[in-house]
């Protein structure tokens, strides 16, 4: 076997840590001390995806996870997603209020347009809203025309800001998918943090052509859809995994570095009558500890920036 040609390891931006200049590479153990409000050691971020999946999805450049899977019209899956926005979400509201949870709602702009009664409920609760793109089939991807993506981002944010009455400073791309231009476009449209990158457990500064964003990592590994529908685990197993993660992060947070338990959940998944009880068990378990601070994504970010 011949030696590897040294030119194989020579390419643009090769450097220690990461081979790009989007953010500074660092180890979590080397980060500065973080203090959450009232001496809390673990921040709890419950992120609720309120999504609209078109019945006539195009699937460009791929079929979005959680979308339609049968030939048109796939009423089975379309109506299940609708069930979450009409029935399951109200079980979420009840559970959040019972356990003192302060959720963040990631909303597709198309859903905000089509479900005014639901938007009014979220607005009345005064919970933070972040933009989840236009709808779940309106993907951002490599090779997408930049002007097309710029228009899509602007339309999504302008309409959601108008409907919600909120500034909307946060963003999650549908399927957490991006093009190389997405962060730059977000920054130019008033977004200050985005949740697509899952390569950390704490926020970090992210460079764009239009200023600095903050990356707020939102765990996929603990997401209800990923664990239950993708990995084919039971709702009981999902709850067990979340509680295991909670126990570990709570113990680890005693190092003073600050930790976040991020839960990305969906009313069409956990809002089902056979699963909602497991969400309630999780919320009861994590809120039973005095070291936990339940807060919105924006509040967690603001506290992190002050530390």
Image (cartoon, grey):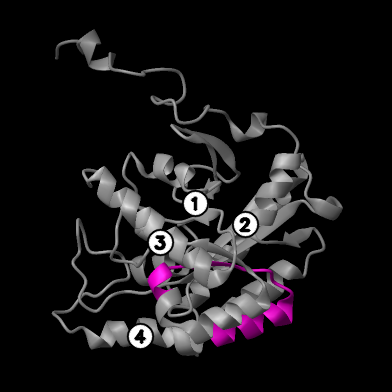
Circle 3 or circle 4, nearest the eye = 3
Vertical position of residue 124 compared to residue 171: above or below: below
Main SS class of the magenta portion in the image: helix
Is there any visible trace of residue 274 in the rendered image? no
Real-space Cα distance between discs 4 and 2? 27 Å
User: Which residue is under mark 4?
Assistant: 80
Examine the image and state in which quarter residue 51 appears: bottom left
98 magenta-colored: yes
Could you classify mark 2 by the number of other residues whose Cα lies within 10 Å: few (under 14), some (14-19), or many (20 or more)? many
C-alpha separation, residue under disc 2 versus residue under disc 1: 10 Å
Query: Is residue 185 in the magenta section?
Result: no
Residue range highlighted in magenta: 89-111
Residue 125 figure quarter: bottom right
Answer whether labels 2 and 1 touch (C-beta < 8 Å): yes
Residue count near mark 1 (Cα–Cα under 10 Å), binned few <14, some 14–19, many ≥20: many
Name the residue located 70 percent from the left edge and 75 percent from the top edge: 284
Q: Quadrant of the C terminus?
A: top right
**Which residue carries the number 2 mark?**
297
* Residue matched to label 1: 195
Mark with earlier residue (4, 1)? 4
* Front disc: 1 or 3: 3
Considering only order in the chain, which callout, 1 or 2, is on the residue closer to the N terminus?
1
Vertical placement of 180 versus 287: above or below? Answer: above
Label 4 neighbour load within 10 Å: few <14, some 14-19, many 20+:
some
- Please give the residue where the numbered disc 3 appears in the rendered image: 156
Q: CA distance from mark 3 to mark 2?
A: 19 Å
Q: In the image, is 7 to the left or to the right of 84?
A: left
At mark 1, the secondary structure is loop
């Amino acid at each position: 076997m011949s030696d590897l040609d040294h030119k194989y390891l020579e390419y643009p931006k090769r450097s220690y840590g990461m081979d790009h200049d989007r953010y500074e590479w660092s180890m979590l153990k080397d980060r500065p001390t973080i203090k959450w409000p009232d001496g809390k050691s673990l921040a709890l971020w419950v992120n609720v995806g309120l999504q609209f999946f078109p019945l006539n999805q195009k699937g460009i450049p791929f079929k979005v996870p959680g979308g339609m899977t049968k030939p048109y019209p796939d009423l089975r899956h379309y109506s299940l997603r609708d069930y979450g926005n009409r029935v399951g979400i109200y079980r979420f509201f009840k559970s959040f209020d019972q356990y003192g949870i302060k959720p963040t709602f990631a909303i597709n702009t198309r859903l905000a347009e089509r479900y005014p009664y639901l938007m009014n409920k979220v607005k009345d609760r005064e919970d933070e809203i972040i933009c989840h793109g236009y709808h779940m089939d309106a993907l951002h991807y490599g090779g997408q025309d930049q002007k097309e993506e710029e228009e899509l981002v602007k339309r999504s944010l302008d309409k959601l800001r108008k409907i919600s009455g909120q500034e909307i400073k946060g963003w999650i791309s549908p399927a957490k998918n991006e093009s190389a231009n997405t962060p730059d476009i977000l920054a130019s449209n008033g977004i200050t943090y985005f949740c697509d990158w899952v390569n950390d457990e704490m926020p970090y500064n992210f460079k764009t052509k239009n200023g600095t964003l903050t990356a707020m990592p939102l765990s996929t590994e603990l997401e209800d859809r990923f664990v239950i529908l993708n990995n084919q685990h039971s709702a009981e197993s999902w709850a067990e995994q979340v509680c295991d993660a909670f126990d570990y992060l709570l113990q680890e947070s005693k190092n003073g570095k600050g930790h976040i338990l991020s839960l990305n959940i969906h009313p069409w998944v956990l809002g089902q009558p056979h699963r909602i009880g497991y969400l309630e068990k999780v919320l009861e378990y994590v809120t039973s500890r005095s070291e936990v601070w339940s807060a919105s994504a924006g509040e967690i970010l603001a506290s992190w920036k002050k530390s």
